[in-house]
Image (tube, rainbow, N blue to C red):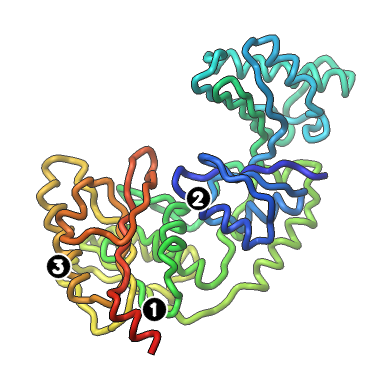
């Protein structure tokens, strides 16, 4: 069966998700705020869930239509062939959101959509009552400027749940966003990669997964695996193929942090991911950082100074980062922070910056490339 599929993504990284889908062989992509739409069948649902590093989840788009009254919403929802996907014992859970729309009461919209789905299935299955003790189908009714989009979630717990994070630490960076930072940086996999504020190790673990072509969803399950329409053999094929293409590259990844307890978490996470031999974690203050390597990358999510009492300390840390870049001109440095005066204290304007969201917090990903001389050297 062919479906319109949606890979949802955090604002700012939709283009990265689209590039991932292109690399997986998908064309005719439609990139919008927070989502990338593409076409696929049951096998593609399994592939997208298993392989996408930067997407939040994979949805099946059931229908899109305009509705300004509850009657319109009900009637157009009943027209959809829900029974093609949902079995007679399916457990239907409806969630919703409404932005700048006439139908602004989300609980009412959810209730109406659920009633419409039940009516549609009653007519098809010729029953008045549903046990709802079977597989889960989470339906979302999303209304934006009176346009309703109805979807079913195939993922379950978000795609950032890779299964390796036993403990996220106090200020977790989502695995999907960490992967996006690595992909945006275009780290070449052969160069040394350092995170001087590594926390629970997420950036370095995601870098190791990328460098070794390890599918991020390989060691977890997805809600749609319980659906009758999803042949279990599909999942066997996708997982076997994912295992076959894993590489075993020799990597140079180092994580530093001043907090020993956080480093213990980072080591535990790397071990759960099966990558403990590829990443070296060491307790160290960023002020003491130095390297004899001429070329390298720093990708980091430093403290933001959310509390006023931390602001001076954060300013001084950013000055230290700026000093490191001056001492290592042929290195590339990438930093994600919500602190609006980052460049001032770093001491240099970034070559590029990109607006991203860490949770609900607006941040910028500041990108400092190699000095021009290093580019000339590479051409010689």
**Residue density around tag 2, few if under 14, some if 14–19, many if 20 or more, within 10 Å:** many
Residue 58 visible somewhere in the drawing: no
Q: Is residue 159 left or right of residue 347?
A: right
Residue 10 x, y percent position in the rendering:
47, 44
Q: Is residue 17 left or right of residue 334?
A: right
Q: Earlier in the sequence, mark 1 or mark 2?
A: 2
Name which quarter of the figure residue 71 lies in.
Answer: top right
Which mark is on residue 287?
3
Question: What residue sits 51% from the left and 48% below the top?
Answer: 14
Residue 53 x, y percent position in the rendering:
53, 56
Residue 372 visible somewhere in the drawing: yes
Name which quarter of the figure residue 322 lies in.
Answer: bottom left
Q: Secondary structure at mark 2?
A: loop
**Residue density around tag 1, few if under 14, some if 14–19, many if 20 or more, within 10 Å:** some
Question: What residue sits 33% from the left and 76% below the top?
Answer: 296
Q: Residue furthest bottom?
A: 380
Q: Secondary structure at mark 3?
A: helix
Which mark is on residue 160?
2
Question: What residue sits 58% from the left and 53% below the top?
Answer: 18
Question: What residue sits 81% from the left and 43% below the top?
Answer: 229
2 and 3 marks in contact (CB < 8 Å): no
133 relative to 41, above or below:
above
Residue position for label 1: 191
């Amino acid at each position: 069966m062919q479906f319109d599929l949606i890979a949802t993504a955090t604002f700012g990284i939709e283009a990265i998700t689209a590039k991932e889908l292109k690399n997986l062989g998908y064309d005719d992509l439609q990139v919008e705020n927070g989502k990338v739409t593409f076409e696929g069948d049951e096998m593609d649902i399994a592939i997208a869930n298993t392989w996408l590093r930067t997407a939040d989840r994979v949805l099946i788009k059931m229908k899109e239509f305009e509705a300004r009254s509850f009657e319109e919403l009900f009637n157009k929802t009943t027209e959809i062939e829900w029974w093609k996907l949902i079995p007679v014992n399916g457990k239907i859970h409806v969630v919703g959101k409404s932005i700048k729309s006439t139908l602004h009461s989300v609980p009412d919209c959810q209730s109406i959509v659920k009633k419409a789905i039940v009516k549609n299935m009653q007519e098809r299955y010729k029953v008045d009552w549903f046990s709802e003790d079977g597989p889960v189908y989470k339906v979302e009714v999303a209304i934006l400027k009176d346009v309703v989009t109805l979807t079913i979630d195939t993922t379950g717990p978000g795609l950032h749940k890779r299964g390796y994070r036993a403990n996220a630490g106090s200020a977790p960076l989502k695995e999907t966003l960490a992967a996006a930072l690595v992909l945006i940086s275009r780290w070449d996999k052969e160069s040394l990669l350092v995170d001087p504020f590594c926390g629970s190790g997420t950036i370095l673990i995601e870098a190791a997964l990328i460098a070794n072509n390890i599918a991020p969803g390989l060691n977890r399950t997805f809600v749609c695996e319980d659906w009758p329409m999803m042949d279990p053999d599909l999942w066997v094929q996708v997982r076997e193929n994912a295992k076959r293409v894993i590489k075993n590259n020799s990597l140079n990844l180092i994580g530093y942090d001043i907090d020993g307890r956080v480093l213990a978490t980072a080591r535990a996470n790397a071990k759960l991911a099966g990558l403990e031999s590829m990443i070296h974690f060491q307790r160290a203050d960023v002020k003491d950082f130095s390297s004899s390597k001429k070329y390298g990358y720093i990708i980091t999510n430093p403290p933001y100074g959310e509390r006023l009492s931390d602001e001076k300390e954060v300013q001084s840390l950013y000055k230290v980062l700026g000093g490191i870049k001056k001492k290592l001109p042929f290195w590339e440095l990438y930093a994600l922070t919500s602190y609006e005066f980052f460049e001032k204290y770093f001491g240099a304007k970034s070559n590029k910056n990109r607006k991203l969201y860490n949770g609900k917090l607006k941040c910028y990903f500041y990108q400092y490339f190699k000095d021009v001389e290093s580019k000339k050297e590479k051409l010689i």
